């Protein structure tokens, strides 16, 4: 592109962002429920759930479904769904391992069981949404992994062959450029791998709000604007202190994810990474016809620094990813949620992918932290003589996997040996991150190396090859 044309393009991208509100589109829905009251005084219960995101909500709901007589309390520091659970892309995947490639690399001996459990988990999410009447715009559309470079197309074709050889390709189809562009028309698309059944699209905030309402209907006592401050043993159970009260419980499930765990020993296993997204105005029928996308699948490109994108129920395009920003010391601050330089970059990438949509404006631009761990997928454990359980490290793929994590936490708290608790994935934890400045330096070097690989035909340098051998990594 000539410099003058590039300058005009940049001006157009910035103009498209000029009226974008720096808040998550999903959380502005007029159907947002009022918060539950804060806890003042003391409570006792059988099970205390800390955290009002998906992880905590699923845990509270399933606990009551397993045993309606179990007395359950849930504490949320702000409002249910306000953080990652309410601002994500709404990709609800069956994968429990952050994709088949990661799962096959780390747990080859149990990957078929993990895939079976993941499919069953997604089915159970769909059933729960129907059973509890949760209007979260659930669409079982599948997802297409898109190649935008010739080397990526070759890698996708080879990967599909490997999946066939492993008996893992059921419902997964390779699409050449013609077949892919018949599904979604972008001049940048070279090939795709369509997982037809393993991913659903949904409205993330409506799922969180619907889960809260289902919990309340089943008798869970939900307290919002009630941060949990300390966790200590108290007699035969546990006690959690809050700003204006306390809860004594026989068992505690921690679903705080990106926020510092009440168990100090768990904190070194996750780091916060900031992810960003844009939302367009609703597309017209003419614009939709220009890009096709009749199947409404979720999409993600195959680069290391990848984008994810999907259609909302009102035909907006959510476009997110690419930048994954880690701040020194693992700081989580509200001012990091807004990053104009990333929004401008994402807007440029959007119009490169869909030049047919030139003139479209973005109405919302937002970001926030997710928790990642060194194996990219959730890890689990217990503490205080198995009276406390935790799940964390979902690495951006928690919309579906948090329900599985809830089942695992409840199995562990109930002392049950199940097909879930017998998994190596559940029994073993990932490697922790090193202290600063080593964590920040390693993450920065990894990000630089991933970007370099994208620019050089996917070739991984010595640092990435070493990280691969050690089972370490960094991903958005």
Image (cartoon, helix red, strand yellow):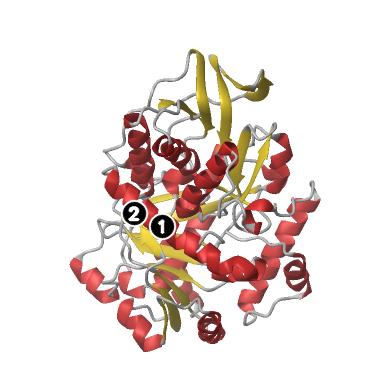
x and y percentages locating residue 313 in the rendered image? 27, 56
- Which residue does the numbered mark 2 point to in the structure image? 126
- Find residue 122 and name its label: 1
Indicate the secondary structure of the residue bearing disc 1.
helix
Residue 32 lies, with reference to residue 323, above or below; the image says above
Indicate the secondary structure of the residue bearing disc 2.
helix
- Which residue is located at x 44 percent, y 62 percent? 119
Residue 346 vs residue 183, the one in the foreground:
183
Name the quadrant containing residue 192.
bottom left
Residue 62 visible? The answer is: yes
**Marks 1/2: CA distance?**
6 Å
x and y percentages locating residue 185 in the rendered image? 33, 78
Marks 1 & 2, CB-CB < 8 Å contact:
yes
Name the quadrant containing residue 385.
top right
Please indicate whether residue 261 sits to the left or right of residue 365 in the image: right
Total labels: the figure holds 2
x and y percentages locating residue 112 in the rendered image? 54, 69
Residue 153 lies, with reference to residue 357, above or below; the image says below
Crowd class of label 2 (few under 14; some 14 to 19; many from 20; radius 10 Å): some
């Amino acid at each position: 592109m000539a410099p003058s044309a590039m300058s005009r393009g940049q001006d157009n991208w910035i103009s498209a962002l000029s009226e974008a509100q720096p808040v998550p589109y999903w959380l502005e829905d007029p159907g947002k429920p009022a918060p539950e009251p804060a806890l003042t005084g003391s409570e006792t219960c059988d099970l205390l759930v800390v955290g009002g995101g998906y992880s905590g909500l699923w845990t509270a709901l399933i606990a009551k479904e397993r045993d309606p007589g179990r007395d359950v309390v849930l504490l949320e520091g702000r409002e249910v769904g306000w953080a990652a659970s309410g601002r994500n892309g709404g990709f609800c995947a069956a994968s429990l391992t952050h994709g088949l490639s990661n799962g096959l690399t780390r747990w080859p001996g149990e990957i078929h069981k993990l895939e079976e459990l993941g499919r069953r988990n997604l089915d159970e999410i769909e059933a729960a949404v129907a059973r509890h009447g949760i209007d979260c715009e659930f669409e079982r559309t599948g997802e297409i992994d898109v190649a935008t470079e010739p080397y990526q197309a070759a890698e996708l074709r080879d990967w599909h062959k490997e999946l066939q050889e492993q008996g893992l390709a059921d419902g997964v189809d390779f699409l050449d450029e013609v077949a892919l562009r018949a599904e979604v028309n972008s001049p940048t698309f070279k090939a795709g791998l369509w997982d037809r059944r393993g991913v659903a699209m949904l409205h993330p905030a409506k799922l969180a709000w619907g889960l809260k309402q289902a919990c309340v209907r089943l008798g869970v006592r939900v307290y919002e604007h009630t941060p949990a401050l300390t966790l200590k043993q108290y007699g035969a159970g546990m006690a959690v202190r809050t700003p204006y009260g306390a809860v004594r419980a026989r068992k505690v499930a921690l679903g705080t994810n990106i926020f510092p765990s009440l168990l100090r020993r768990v904190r070194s296993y996750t780091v916060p990474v900031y992810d960003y997204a844009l939302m367009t105005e609703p597309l017209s029928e003419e614009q939709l016809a220009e890009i096709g996308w009749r199947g409404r699948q979720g999409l993600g490109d195959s680069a290391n620094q990848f984008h994810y994108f999907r259609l909302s129920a009102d035909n907006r395009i959510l476009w997110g990813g690419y930048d994954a920003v880690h701040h020194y010391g693992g700081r989580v601050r509200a001012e990091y949620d807004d990053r104009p330089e990333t929004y401008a970059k994402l807007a440029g990438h959007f119009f490169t992918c869909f030049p047919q949509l030139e003139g479209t404006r973005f109405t919302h631009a937002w970001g926030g932290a997710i928790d990642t761990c060194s194996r990219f997928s959730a890890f689990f454990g217990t503490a205080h003589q198995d009276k406390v359980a935790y799940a964390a490290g979902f690495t951006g793929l928690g919309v579906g996997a948090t329900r599985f994590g809830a089942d695992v936490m409840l199995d562990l708290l109930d002392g049950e040996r199940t097909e879930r608790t017998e998994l190596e994935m559940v029994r073993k934890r990932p490697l922790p991150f090193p202290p600063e400045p080593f964590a920040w330096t390693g993450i920065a070097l990894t990000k630089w190396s991933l970007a370099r690989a994208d620019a050089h035909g996917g070739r991984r340098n010595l640092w990435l090859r070493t990280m691969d051998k050690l089972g370490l990594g960094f991903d958005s």
